Amino acid sequence: MSEATPRVAIVTGAARGIGAATAQRLAADGHAVAVLDLDEANTKETVQAIEAAGGTALGVGADVSDAEQVQAAVDRVAAELGPPVVLINNAGVTRDNMLFKMTEVDWDVVMNVHLRGAFLMARACQKYMVDATFGRIVNLSSVSALGNRGQANYSTAKAGLQGFTKTLAIELGKFGVTANAIAPGFIQTEMTKATAERLGIAFDDFIKGAASQIPVARVGQPEDIAHLVSFFVSEGAGFVSGQVVYAAGGPRA
Ligand code: NAP
């Protein structure tokens, strides 16, 4: 199914996981997609998958927490694909530790990628959205925003992204720009695999254990989140803004 109006979208952290599935979904919806990740070489697989399916993609390397790299990346997307009016702030990292063991670096890295990154990307893209009187911003929060043992840094950043989302919705609404957040529960990706490894649990067992606690009796897949992103980005979703949707297979995180 193609969108009525093809747009240019940037998906950060799109080399793999939720970002890769989202980039592929937006391309299938008819948008040209900038597949942004730390290392441009790592974006190849996602770009090739989009092109193989008949879509348009551009691989871009940038650290979202670096202002100069963000500006250069957004300038490049605008020059090579067109004005980026859809932004999915998905890049993320974890540096889990109990508070008493958490280092300043653990704290700063997580704040910088999630919060500074989303801020820098949104600031660099907003003028294209305002000029077009159309924009869609989707920020990846998490059920961890409600509090999660061992994630003082990550839960703070993910809660912060919810406030950021609501403020963008208020500031940019009159320009036709919506901002929404998705707070996923357990999604099967390299990120949750790394968590299983850290806890010394086989990934399959970790997945089974998580699924047993989830009402729909399975863990989430990246495509589950991509589907929700596709809705928020769609033309018809223009009256939905400043919302946080928990996509966790049930009512409670
Ligand atoms: P993932 O598989 O670890 O993928 C994250 C991607 O972000 C990686 O390709 C990573 O690149 C990239 N990245 C990290 N730091 C970056 C930076 N500074 N600049 C640009 N790209 C950067 O993670 P995921 O599970 O798909 O998660 C995607 C988003 O959903 C994250 O924001 C995460 O917090 C959120 N989320 C995930 C879950 C879950 O259960 N998986 C649940 C709730 C929320 P490198 O590989 O080069 O580091």
Image (tube, rainbow, N blue to C red):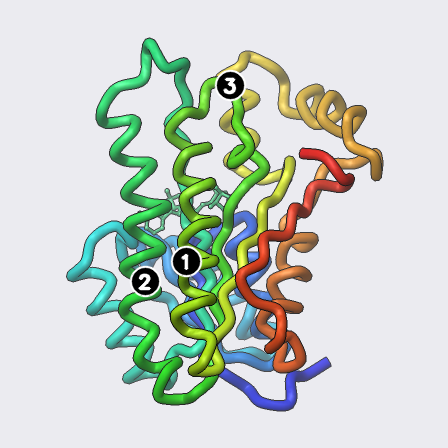
> Which residue occupies 36% across, 15% down?
99
Q: Is 153 above or below relative to 205?
A: below
Nearest the viewer among 48 and 250 is 250
Q: Amino acid at mark 3?
A: Arg
Q: Which mark is first along the chain, 1 or 2?
A: 1
Residue under circle 2? Answer: 121
Q: CA distance from mark 3 to mark 2?
A: 29 Å
Position of the N terminus by quadrant: bottom right
Disc 3/disc 1 C-alpha distance (Å): 27 Å
Residue at the spot of label 3: 149
Residue 82 x %, y % = 37, 85
Q: What SS does tag 1 mark? A: strand
Horizontal arrangement in the rendering, residue 179 relative to residue 34 (left or right): right
Above or below residue 242? Residue 63 is above
Chain-order first, disc 3 or disc 1: 1
Q: Which residue is mark 1?
A: 12
Q: Nearer the viewer, residue 70 or 246?
A: 246
Q: Would residue 47 be visible to someone looking at this image?
A: no
- Please tell me which residue lies in front, 101 or 199: 101
Using a 10 Å C-alpha cutoff, classify the residue at mark 3 as few (fewer than 14 neighbours), some (14 to 19) or many (20 or more).
Answer: few
Q: Residue furthest left?
A: 68
Q: In the rendered view, does 212 fall on the left or right side of 34?
A: right
Q: Residues within 10 Å of mark 2 (few under 14, many from 20)?
A: many
Marks 2 and 1 in Cβ contact (< 8 Å): yes
Q: Quadrant of the C terminus?
A: top right
Ligand 1 near label 3 (Cβ, under 8 Å)? no
Image quadrant of ligand 1 equals top left
| Closer to viewer: mark 3 or mark 1 | 3
| Proximity of marks 3 and 2: CB atoms separated by less than 8 Å | no
Q: Residue at x 34, y 82 (%)?
A: 128
Image location (x, y in percent) of residue 172 = 41, 73
Q: Residue at the location (22% across, 24% down)?
A: 104
